Image (cartoon, rainbow, N blue to C red):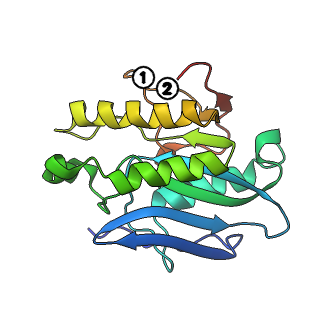
Amino acid sequence: MTKPTYKYPAFVTNVDLRSNNGKRYWLNLEIDKNKSDRIIVILKNPSKADKIISDKTVFNVSSYIYRNQEKYSELNNVGNIIILNLMPHYLTDSSRLKEFKETIFDQENIRTLNEYCGKNKNVIIAWGNHPSGLYYEYEKLKEETKKVLTKNNNQVFYVDKMTNAGNPKHGQVWGYENELKKVIEL
């Protein structure tokens, strides 16, 4: 069975990204050119979203932020959503990420996280649990990302709850009624 193709929601007015060699480093969704804030969302890895098509996770994350702009002050003035990832490899099935085990630490991706977190205050973490076969590597990537967030003094949020393993709920499974919560300690 083929997975559905997702279009960007009508409120997304412009899409830009940086990708090469099967990796996407950032995805910028403009949702209101009259609003100046940008919010960062850090996910696990890119699935399919590019300049033309969205994917289930990006569709869900952008819709959650758009629909909750009135509810949360941190989202009131968001004009752009910037999607970053722990791992930049384009793969819909994250269990296949173990194929990149030896090269999963991508210095360009770490630089990208640092650059965007340094320029933007609010960050929602939404990477979910580790992919199979990459527990140690995933923990190291999470720690590196937490260092970036701490160094840049970001305001860090998550949606709904942390998993039993202590990871933020993945953006693909956020419900529109789920609460946006501030991380007390990274």
Q: Amino acid at mark 2?
A: Met
> Left or right of 145: which side holds 2?
left
Locate the N terminus by quadrant. bottom left
What residue is pinned by disc 1?
Answer: 166
Which amino acid lies under the numbered mark 1 shown in the image of this protein? Gly
User: In the displayed structure, would residue 85 be above or below residue 161?
Assistant: below
Q: Which mark is residue 84?
A: none
Identity of the residue furthest to the bottom in this view: 52
**Residue displayed at 64% across by 58% down:** 81
Whether residue 6 appears in this view of the structure is no
Tally of numbered tags: 2
Q: Are the residues tagged 2 and 1 within 8 Å (C-beta)?
A: yes
- Callout 2: few (<14), some (14-19), or many (20+) C-alpha neighbours within 10 Å? some
Give me the residue at 65% from left, 45% from top: 176
Q: Is residue 148 above or below residue 10?
A: above
Q: Is residue 20 visible?
A: yes
In the image, is 82 to the left or to the right of 52? right
Q: Position of residue 127 (x, y in %)?
A: 43, 41
Q: Secondary structure at mark 2?
A: loop
**Figure quadrant of residue 174:** top right
Neighbourhood count class around disc 1 (C-alpha, 10 Å): few under 14, some 14–19, many 20 upward? few
The image position of residue 72, as x and y in percent, is: 79, 39
Residue at 58% across, 72% down? 8
- Badge 1 element: loop
> Image quarter for residue 145?
top left
Residue pointed to by mark 2: 162
- In the rendered image, residue 126, in percent from the top left (x then y), is placed at 50, 41
- The answer to whether residue 130 is left or right of residue 142 is left
Q: Nearer the viewer, residue 139 or 114?
A: 114
* Separation of residues labelled 2 and 1 (CA atoms): 5 Å
Residue 41's spot in the image, x, y percent? 56, 48
- Position of 49 with respect to 119 (left or right) is left
